[in-house]
Image (tube, grey):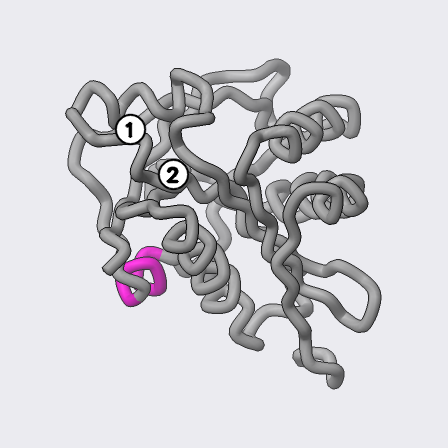
Amino acid sequence: MPPARPLSFRTLSGEEIGAHLADLADLRITVFAAFPYLYDGSAEYEADYVREFAAEPGSVMIAAFDQDRIVGAATASPMAGQKPDIRGPFEQRGYDVGAMFYFGESVLLPEYRGQGAGHAFFGGREACARAAGARHACFASVIRPPDHPARPADYTPLDGFWGRRGYAPIPGLTTQMHWQDHAEAEETAKTMQYWLRALD
């Protein structure tokens, strides 16, 4: 059952993000441990990752609060500031990465789902992207086979939700990211599918 208290949402930037980096790192480790990411995260890696994100000019975080506790977060930053393995596939296709925003993680503790956080996360990031002059927004989702042994019987992909938000997968537009699954002894490459929408 959803908690009785409604969630509140705030858009954070600059030093405001810095004050909540530990919360973001903890959420990533907790939420991404589940299928489809199966992420076996480490506090050391997460500390470096979130510091790097916060240092990117134009970065924003939409934070979901239960009173004064962060229980979910979604991040975004200009595509032009991303690493080559993130922006490269778009550059190779001729996209103007200077007019794009890249949406990173969108993580929410399971007990708070069903309260509209997904729409709030996307709506908040899209508003920030438009305010920055971006014409497109994109994100990447991991590709897992339908018969993956760790796939829960009741798992429902988010493709339908993303489609209703105006996003569509771009055929052949993928990248590789590396992390260690819980069942793996070391990091391996994971194929990530890009989803894109125009910001009208």
**Residue indicated by mark 2:** 140
Residue 181 horizontal side relative to residue 50, left or right:
left
Quadrant for the N terminus, please.
bottom right
Asked if residue 112 is positioned above or below residue 159 in the image, the reply reads below
Residue 153, magenta (yes or no): no
- Does residue 148 appear left or right of residue 23 in this picture? left
Q: Position of residue 15 (x, y in %)?
A: 74, 42
Q: Which residue is mark 1?
A: 174
Name the residue type under label 2: Ala
Front one among 191 and 198:
198
Residue 100 vs 48, above or below: the answer is below
Q: Is residue 11 left or right of residue 118?
A: right
Q: CA distance from mark 2 to mark 1?
A: 8 Å
Q: Quadrant of residue 89?
A: top left
Residue 123 visible within the image: yes
| Callouts 2 and 1 close, C-beta under 8 Å | yes
> Residue 87, how many percent across, how many down?
35, 25
